[in-house]
Image (cartoon, rainbow, N blue to C red):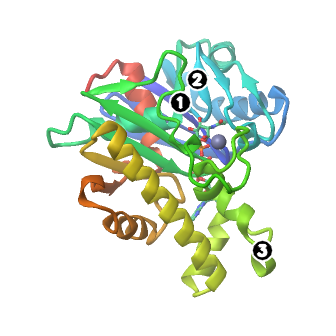
């Protein structure tokens, strides 16, 4: 069977046809519209899936936000231009007339990365550092979504009680500091108005402020990983997202983690499926794949 897999992030929408052997074809991307109203997202999804839908048997969505009963509920609406709620499954079923499944993006990616592991790991955590900071937990070989879909939202744990206010309403969340948006929001002077991608380029050129912003994100992420180890006793943490996968980032996270007592140390790796982990995880879940 062919799955039309869709990944809805705070910055980009991606879609592709995924075969049961996980081969990807016709991958497409569009920017995520920033609008409080659902119409813009609906229109963008329509444009994204229309060229692909006739070749698919089902739809599988990995989306930013808490996914509850097929609906997207933003914990941080700022990542979606203020959009609070979107009827994901209903919208895609109406657009494609295909059976549709939806799951949180980081939960989906965690499942794909877990299924890709060749060893006997049963407990792992996936962290995406992207527009926001998301997470997915696999415990005892099972993906943990929670009864309300909130499980694994690691980006909304505390990094600094004196830190910036997060879009979720709490003060000092990991996401408010370490995410692409968090890095960009802290930039001042010559870097004011730059996005995280530009800040990483400037850091690579030796810009001092840019290097500090990247280093602080990596440090906050390392602390989050230590907390995650303490909570889950996972054997591996996999890092994804465009910030997480950026050149040199994971090396900095690893160096910070190594400064901590050994009990917090855990195997760290970059996502095996790189930027496609969400798409493939959603497709695997739609296939009913148990790993
Ligand atoms: P999404 O959140 O939509 O899933 P991404 O994983 O691409 O999308 O994350 C978007 C964030 O990553 C933005 O803040 C963007 O500035 C940043 N980003 C994109 N490319 C890079 C890069 N090469 N290096 C560092 N940051 C990047
Ligand atoms: C936010 C939250 C999570 C999501 C994470 C990463 C919203 C809209 N999203 O913490 O559900 O998993 O961002 O999302 O509240 P991404 O867009 O950065 O991939
Ligand atoms: Zn938060």
Looking at the picture, tell me which residue is in the foreground, 121 or 63.
121
Alpha carbons under labels 2 and 1: distance apart: 6 Å
Q: Which quadrant of the view contains residue 138?
A: top left
Mark 1 CB within 8 Å of ligand 2:
yes
- The residue located at (30%, 22%) in the rendering is 289
Q: Describe residue 215's horizontal placement relative to residue 32 as left or right.
A: left
Q: Earlier in the sequence, mark 3 or mark 1?
A: 1
Viewport quadrant of the C terminus: top left
Q: What crowding class fits label 3: few (fewer than 14 Cα within 10 Å), some (14-19), or many (20 or more)?
A: few
Looking at the picture, tell me which residue is in the foreground, 164 or 201.
164
Please state the horizontal and vertical placement of residue 220, each as a whole percent of the image.
51, 59
Quadrant field for ligand 2? top right
Q: Earlier in the sequence, mark 3 or mark 2?
A: 2
Please state the horizontal and vertical placement of residue 249, each as a whole percent of the image.
46, 67
Front of the two marks 3 and 1: 3
Q: Are marks 3 and 1 in contact (CB under 8 Å)?
A: no
Q: Secondary structure at mark 1?
A: strand
Q: Which quadrant of the view contains residue 169?
A: top right
- The residue located at (33%, 63%) in the rendering is 260
Alpha carbons under labels 3 and 1: distance apart: 33 Å
Alpha carbons under labels 3 and 2: distance apart: 35 Å
Q: Which residue is mark 2?
A: 67
Q: Which residue is mark 3?
A: 188
The single residue placed furthest to the left in the displayed view is 120
Please state the horizontal and vertical placement of residue 278, each as a whole percent of the image.
47, 38
Q: Are marks 2 and 1 in contact (CB under 8 Å)?
A: yes
Q: Which mark is residue 104?
A: 1
């Amino acid at each position: 069977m062919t799955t039309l897999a869709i990944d809805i992030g705070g910055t980009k929408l991606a879609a592709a046809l995924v075969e049961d052997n996980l081969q990807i074809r016709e991958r497409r991307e569009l920017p995520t519209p920033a609008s409080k109203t659902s119409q813009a997202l609906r229109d963008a999804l329509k444009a994204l899936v229309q060229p692909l839908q006739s070749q698919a048997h089902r739809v599988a969505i990995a989306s930013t936000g808490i996914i509850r009963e097929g609906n997207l509920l933003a914990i941080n609406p700022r990542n979606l231009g203020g959009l609070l709620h979107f009827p994901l499954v209903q919208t895609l079923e109406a657009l494609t007339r295909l059976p549709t499944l939806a799951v949180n993006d980081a939960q989906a990616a965690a499942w794909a990365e877990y299924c890709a592991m060749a060893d006997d790991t049963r407990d792992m955590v996936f962290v995406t550092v992207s527009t926001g900071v998301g997470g997915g937990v696999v415990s005892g070989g099972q993906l943990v979504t929670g009864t309300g879909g909130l499980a694994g939202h690691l980006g909304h744990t505390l990094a600094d009680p004196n830190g910036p206010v997060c879009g979720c309403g709490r003060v000092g969340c990991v996401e408010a500091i370490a995410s692409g948006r968090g890095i960009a929001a802290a930039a001042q002077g010559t870097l004011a108005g730059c996005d995280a991608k530009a800040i990483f380029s400037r850091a690579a050129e030796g810009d001092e402020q840019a290097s500090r912003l990247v280093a602080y994100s990596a440090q906050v992420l390392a602390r989050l990983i230590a907390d995650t180890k303490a909570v889950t006793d996972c054997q591996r943490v996999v890092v994804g997202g465009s910030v997480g996968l950026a050149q040199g980032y994971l090396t900095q996270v690893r160096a910070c983690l190594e400064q901590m007592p050994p009990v917090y140390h855990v195997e760290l790796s970059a996502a095996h499926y790189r930027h496609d982990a969400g798409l493939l995880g959603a497709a695997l879940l739609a296939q009913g794949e148990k790993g």
